[in-house]
Amino acid sequence: MENNYDILQVPEGAAPREIQAAFRRLALLHHSDRGGDMEQFKRIKRAYEDLKQGKKYPDSEKERLRNSRVYSGDDEAETRRRNAILAAEISGEMRLAGDWAAALARSGASGTRLFGSKTLGEMEFSVGGPARPPGALAIKGNVMAGSLVHDGPILMQGSVNSPSFAPEHATSLTLTRGDFKLVSPTKNRYRVENGASITAENGDIVVGNVTGSKSRVQDPDGKVGLYVTVERRTRLLSPRGSIVAGDVADTVSMDARTVIAVNMENDVRVAAKEIMVYGSKMTYDVSFELKRGGQIRFFTKGSVLGLSDDATISLENGKSFYLHTLKTRKIRDLPGAGPRPGGPGRGSGGRGDTMVGGGFSITYAMLDRLGGDGGAAAKGAGGRSWRSRLGLGR
């Protein structure tokens, strides 16, 4: 009979470090994100988890399903019930993990422990250690539900998700001090998604791609033909620090002193004192709120056509603008604006360039002097964009 050592292709009695290296190699080979077989990936992962618990032989499928509390059934009601049960299980594990980590941090001790579910995957929590700051928490694995508050930095190897059918167990990670960081998130394809929230009260947030979700579902009261919109907005909050993200899309809010992102699309809201956009794509339903004394910079050196004219920028004093206004305003026409370093040219910031692109600093004071665009304010309240008012469509 094939045992867990055979599945991981290591000799019996192999050292934990050798088992871990084999698991990582096979996981990368078989993960679906890399074109592999997801069922084989799950089999490898179960073998690795069993060996960590000292189990040589894998459970039978019947025993595994019973232990993991997975319920059969393919209809939507059964799926919701199953997900709600799993979310409650993970949420309870997150509470235990938070209490355990807090106790170790208070005592200045260090340790490692597994939490989570066999069905959704276990999470390895580690507090302290020689290579980490005092009280730092390291998490390996995907966080799927529940809330955790930690008084220290969090370094995470995994994605942060939130359950679709159990809003009472929505994922929320809060740091009262220190930074939240995903390890090489772009390379590892780690994401923050589906309505999860991360708050760093006195630190920075460094993540990869960030997504929420929005869907139309049948009326919960059963009214035939009536649908409602269910929004799972993913939220990142760093009131005294920075948020660094990759592509941000599909119902996301970010609020920080500084927000740095690549591309933004489909209902993204940003509030910050400094906003920096490095990509060349921003859709019409992106909105910026610039805090007093702040600035916005677009770093694209090529075409700015992918930055929608209908995206809006508002100031704390209530003035608002379409991006169209800034894309057509020349730097030389701004009171007191001099050329950017590097001489003339589109990417170097000559006085003949527009305000958008090349890293030009569009300051709060500049926007305040422009006077605002009443149409942009109206759009936020259900009004039409400048294109619609001119009969050009969206």
Image (cartoon, rainbow, N blue to C red):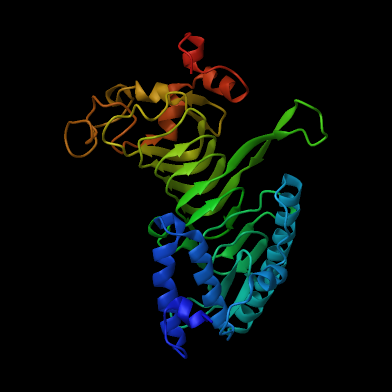
Whether 151 is drawn above or below 357: the answer is below
Residue at the image position 70 percent from the left and 59 percent from the top:
87
Residue at the image position 82 percent from the left and 33 percent from the top:
222
Q: Looking at the figure, which quarter contains the N terminus?
A: bottom right
Nearest the viewer among 193 and 119 is: 119
How many labels were placed on the picture?
A: 0
Where residue 168 appears, x then y in whole percent? 74, 53
Residue at the image position 18 percent from the left and 39 percent from the top:
342
Whether 192 is drawn above or below 305: the answer is below
Nearest the viewer among 1 and 267 is: 1
Specify whether 36 is left or right of 268: left
Q: Residue 29 sits in which quadrant? A: bottom left
Where residue 36 appears, x then y in whole percent? 42, 59
Residue at the image position 45 percent from the left and 40 percent from the top:
294
Where residue 351 appears, x then y in whole percent? 24, 27
Nearest the viewer among 312 and 119 is: 119
Residue most extreme to the bottom: 13
Residue most extreme to the left: 343
Q: Is residue 255 visible?
A: yes
Nearest the viewer among 160 and 30 is: 30
Residue most extreme to the front: 1
Q: Is residue 167 visible?
A: no
Whether 229 is drawn above or below 327: the answer is below
Where residue 364 appears, x then y in whole percent? 44, 34
